[in-house]
Image (cartoon, grey):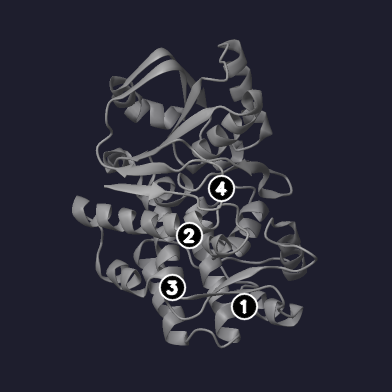
Amino acid sequence: MIIPIRLESSTVRGYNVTIDRLPKLSFDRKVVVVTNHTVAEFHLDTLLSKLNAKSLDIVTVKDGEEYKNLDTMIEILDELFSKQLDRKSLLIAFGGGVIGDMTGFTASIYQRGIDFIQIPTTLLAQVDASVGGKTGVNNRFGKNLIGAFYQPKAVYIDIDFLETLPKREFSAGMAELIKMSVMFDREFFEFLEEDTLSSKESLNRAIARSVELKAWVVNQDEKEAGIRAVLNYGHTFAHVIENETNYKKYLHGEAVAIGMVMANLLSYELGLISLDEVDRVKRILIKHNLPTTYKIKDIEGFYNKFFLDKKSSNSKIKFILANGIGNFEIRDNLPKEIILKVLSKFKGVK
């Protein structure tokens, strides 16, 4: 299956997301694959058997969200300069969302921009992070605060790479699938409620639907001036959780799952969603072994960290909220009291 990204308002040409077995890829230029040790151990030989290039090198970085920073970026850049890549060279991001974000950002700044493609190997990266051109790294102030919108030239999604994915990583990817369904497609949500995605057919169907939904959003709003902000459902809370735990306790999808629970309670306080719908979303998260609780030690401190988020502006916090299941609402004018009321429900929660 091929899903096109067309970027209606951009001067950047579109590209395709291919969901199928990884094809043979040939390039008449220098190619560098950026990956981590875990992915390399399981899948690098498979990738190399599919690649043909003028020259081919591998850059391997440490594995984990805590290494998604400028220090690792400098390591990658140093490797590229030492290998004398030119402006016609190509980077391949081969790994999860961390690898994709860092490789894309590296491509955007190396000699003012070179091409890159995405070959995601985690469910989270396949359904979300590899599509749409968001790239970047974290710093001590928050998540993805340094980065760029920089589109890949192609995305290749092969679910065979998921066969070695740990169950916890698979569950983290499910959080993004659930996110898309709650925001945009009630029928898709009901499918995820009923199906375990244990067959390749159902997993391919779920990945394809998620990518279709994201493509529909990104095609309208490449740089998050409007509807693309909806993809951050759960993320406003999640980014604070990740920052408070130094990006070590939770995988990104796990933090997003908790963030969705928090966001839904805020929606309930505003009368946008019923308690039954709040419970249904929580149950589907639990079904896929995702966390739904978080202990907030300092409510005021948690609240103040919202203002470090990229989506906040003019001293207003932008919240993406479920308006029932399958619809959304964006609010940036909520009184502090109602936000603190929701956060207080997590004070002392284990």
Mark whose residue sits in front, 4 or 2 = 4
Q: Secondary structure at mark 4?
A: loop
The mark that comes first in sequence, 1 or 4, is 4
Q: Quadrant of residue 298?
A: bottom right
Per the image, the residue denoted by label 3 is 282
* Front one among 206 and 285: 206
| Separation of residues labelled 4 and 2 (CA atoms) | 14 Å
Q: What amino acid type should be assigned to the residue bearing mark 1? A: Lys
The mark that comes first in sequence, 1 or 3, is 3
The mark that comes first in sequence, 4 or 2, is 4
Mark whose residue sits in front, 1 or 4 = 4
x then y, percent, for residue 340: 71, 77
Q: Secondary structure at mark 3?
A: helix
* Front one among 256 and 28: 28
Q: What amino acid type should be assigned to the residue bearing mark 4? A: Ser
| Separation of residues labelled 2 and 3 (CA atoms) | 25 Å
Q: Are marks 4 and 3 in contact (CB under 8 Å)?
A: no
| Separation of residues labelled 1 and 3 (CA atoms) | 15 Å
x then y, percent, for residue 273: 50, 84
Per the image, the residue denoted by label 4 is 10
Q: What amino acid type should be assigned to the residue bearing mark 3? A: Lys
State left or right for residue 129 relative to residue 68.
left
Per the image, the residue denoted by label 2 is 217
| Separation of residues labelled 4 and 3 (CA atoms) | 37 Å
Q: Residue at x 49, y 31 (%)?
A: 116
Residue 169 seen from this side: no
Q: Residue at x 26, y 54 (%)?
A: 203
Mark whose residue sits in front, 4 or 3 = 4
Q: Secondary structure at mark 1?
A: loop
The mark that comes first in sequence, 1 or 2, is 2
Q: Callout 3: few (<14), some (14-19), or many (20+) C-alpha neighbours within 10 Å?
A: some
